[in-house]
Amino acid sequence: MTPCHLVLSAMKTSGFTFLLFCLSFFLIGSPCAGRTEATNVLFIVADDLRDTVGCYGNRFVKTPNLDRLAARGVRFERAYAQYPVCNPSRTSFLTGLRCEQTGVVDNRWFFRDLIPAQPTMPQWL
């Protein structure tokens, strides 16, 4: 696999850490900086799965497609959620901000209502 064909697959990774990686990769420069072709990034995040898939060693769960994708990409072994509820953790991941900074600390809020101008990782990409 060349650096220009980077496939990232992760389960609940730290938003701030990954956002720093993305920003450094795309803003500082990628290994393909002088090339004219676009760099493709496939990043898959699955919410509320924990490590209960085959590529993490669970023999009872059959996930052959995820297992093949994980074998070709990067699998995070020490991934942590920002908050024990899905919406704040997802908002933190998308924005790179801690839950206390966004104000999203439960599942009732849409983050755009609280921080409407905050760019997200998909917007940067």
Image (cartoon, rainbow, N blue to C red):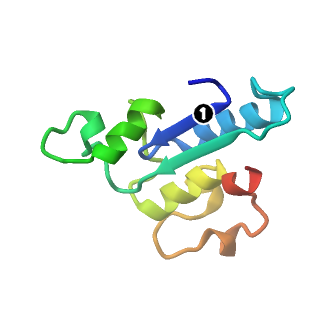
- Can you give x and y, in whole percent of width and height, for residue 57 in the image? 22, 33
Q: Does 74 appear above or below 51? A: above
Tell me the crowding category of disc 1: few under 14, some 14 to 19, or many 20 or more residues within 10 angstroms, Cα based.
some
Q: Quadrant of residue 72?
A: top left
> Circle 1 sits in a helix, a strand or a loop, which is it?
strand
Q: Residue furthest left?
A: 60
Left or right of 92 in this view: 38? right
Q: Residue furthest front?
A: 37
Can residue 60 be seen in the rendering of this structure?
A: yes
What's the residue at 30%, 36% (across, down)?
55
What's the residue at 84%, 29% (across, down)?
35
The amino acid beneath tag 1 is Leu
Give whichever of 51, 15 is nearer the camera: 51
- Can you give x and y, in whole percent of width and height, for residue 95 in the image? 66, 53
Q: Quadrant of residue 28?
A: top right
Left or right of 33 in this view: 24? left
- Can you give x and y, in whole percent of width and height, for residue 60 in the image? 12, 44
Q: Please state, as top left, top right, bottom left or bottom right, where the N terminus lies in the image.
A: top right
What's the residue at 57%, 59% (across, down)?
91
Give whichever of 44, 67 is nearer the camera: 67
Give whichever of 115, 27 is nearer the camera: 27
Which residue is under mark 1? 6
Can residue 76 be seen in the rendering of this structure?
A: no
Give whichever of 57, 15 is nearer the camera: 57
For the image, the number of numbered tags is 1
- Can you give x and y, in whole percent of width and height, for residue 65 in the image? 34, 46
